[in-house]
Amino acid sequence: MAAAVGPPYRPSVAILGGLPAIVPDVVISAIYIVLFLGMAAANMTILQVNKRRRHRFPISGMLYGLCMARVTTLILRIAWATAPRNARLGLAATIFVNCGIVLLYVANLVFAQRVLRARQPPLGWHPALRVVVWVAYACIVASLVMAITSAVWNAYTVPDDVRAKLLCRALLRGASTMLLVVATLPFLLLALATLLPRCYDEEAFGRGSMLAKMLVLALSALLCVAIACFKTGAAWAPARHISAPAWYHGLAPFYLFIFTLELVDVTLLTASRVDQRFHVPDGSRKPGDYSRGHSRLSDASS
């Protein structure tokens, strides 16, 4: 087999999912495409119905975007399987694997912040907490930039440039670790909401009980942490040659810890109707605003 004459170069070390093949990647990817398209259609329907009712909930649009990003990822993987020598397809597929999931991190942070603001208004609305959340958003953006830079730089670096390869790996490790920390942040906000003494001015928002909201959020955050742990563990593990991959580079862990868990998470959020459960009034900026919107919702439901 002829060696690559120029960049981008094909992977020389083992990657998550390995190099795709027509059998079985095409069939598996096609099944996931159908499933993600179904969830995309469901979230777009919810978004449009809510829009007609003047019920604003942009996170439904984010879930739609996540599903379509995963459809694109899987289409690229199918294309790469049919053209395994095309390094550009491989690079694009690798980049898209690291995208999409971050939208779930953002959604969980939004939900956790709303729960904390309702249970502990003085703390939840404190400017310091707002800064912490915005720093988390900045970390998500930075981690995406680092992961994409690592993938592109690695693909356009000659295989025997050890120093550049180590720097690429350091970028990927930093990005993965940063996302893992962000994925765990909703648990910290949930702990503050539940373990601190109850406030006299505790508020209600959306539909359903606060316990149900916290359970949905905890399950979603747990799935995100599992995905982040898998990616971070793989990033920090010693590099292995592409001909001698570890178990976590295999197809089963790849489809399970990335696509399956993401699909379960999106299904959980969609089926539990987070657009109703976690909705807050537009323009909420201070303690008391959530209760104002909840009172109107209760009047409309009665």
Image: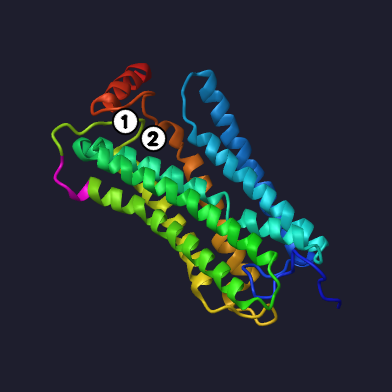
Number of callouts: 2
Amino acid under label 2? Phe
Place of residue 16 in the rendered image (x, y in percent of width and height, measured from the top left): 61, 68
Place of residue 281 in the rendered image (x, y in percent of width and height, measured from the top left): 36, 24
Q: Quadrant of residue 151?
A: bottom right
Work out whether 30 lies above or below 57: below
Quadrant for the C terminus, please: top left
Q: Is residue 26 visible?
A: no
Asked if residue 213 lies left or right of residue 287, the reply is right
Segment colored magenta: 194-198
Place of residue 51 in the rendered image (x, y in percent of width and height, measured from the top left): 53, 22
Amino acid under label 1? Phe
164 and 145: which is toward the camera: 164
Packing grade of label 2 (10 A; few <14, some 14-19, many >=20) is many
Asked if residue 146 lies left or right of residue 155, the reply is left
Q: Are marks 1 and 2 in contact (CB under 8 Å)?
A: yes
Report which residue position mark 1 lands on. 205
Q: Which mark is residue 278?
A: 2
Q: Which mark is residue 4?
A: none
For the point 48% across and 19% down, the residue is 54
